[in-house]
Image (tube, rainbow, N blue to C red):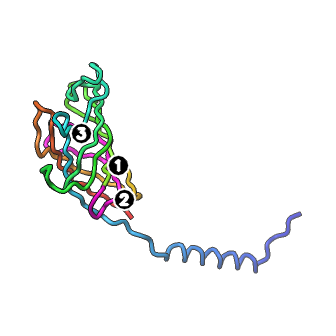
Amino acid sequence: MATPLNPTSNFFFFIFTVTLLYVAYTIPRHQPRETNLVFYVHDYLTGHDASAVAVAGRAGPESSILHFGTVLVVDDPVTEGPTIESREIGRAQGMYVNSQLDGKGLHLVFSVIFTDGVHEGSTLEIQGADLFSMAEREFGVVSGTGKFRFVKGYGVMVTEFMDIANLRAVLKLNVTVKHY
């Protein structure tokens, strides 16, 4: 037969529980920092400095990114300013998939790998829809490394320059993230 707990052990258990709760709720917590970044991605499918290539689609690797089902792999320069002569601070590496039946929308998944500047060695993982006929498009920042561990955020993409005939574009990304 079990013995009932005596009042002294109940009292000590109560004091222990209250102390534990007090400590748990009074320890300072780290608050996330908010960082805003503006950078430019140079997406060139043609020319001597091409940084993107179609790898699959209805017509195989000869498919145009403007056609539904085309998969494009990118290793685009990321710069501080809108011109290619601006300081390169990283690379945007990943892929775009034309996922809209009329060909006017991409799904993008890529890493921004910072190779210079204050965020050197860190990355941001970007994912979302790019309906490139819209002036502004929002996307999600879903992960990161280095200074951006445990990141969450969003970005707004604007086409700074587009040459549809030669499939060359410069995209301005304004990214806001919260991280520790």
Residues at marks 1 and 3 touching, judged by CB atoms closer than 8 Å: no
For badge 1, the amino acid type reads: Glu
Circle 1 residue: 125
- Residue with the most extreme front position: 48
Mark 2, secondary structure of its residue: helix
For badge 3, the amino acid type reads: Ser
Circle 2 residue: 148
Mark 1, secondary structure of its residue: strand
- Residue with the most extreme right position: 1
In front of the other: 129 or 6: 129
Q: Nearer the viewer, mark 2 or mark 3?
A: 3
Q: Quadrant of residue 21?
A: bottom right
For badge 2, the amino acid type reads: Phe
Magenta region: 115-142
Residue 119 is left or right of residue 5, and the answer is left
In front of the other: 144 or 47: 47
Q: Residue at x 14, y 44 (%)?
A: 159
Circle 3 residue: 51
The residue carrying pointer 3 sits among few (fewer than 14), some (14 to 19) or many (20 or more) residues within 10 Å by Cα, namely some
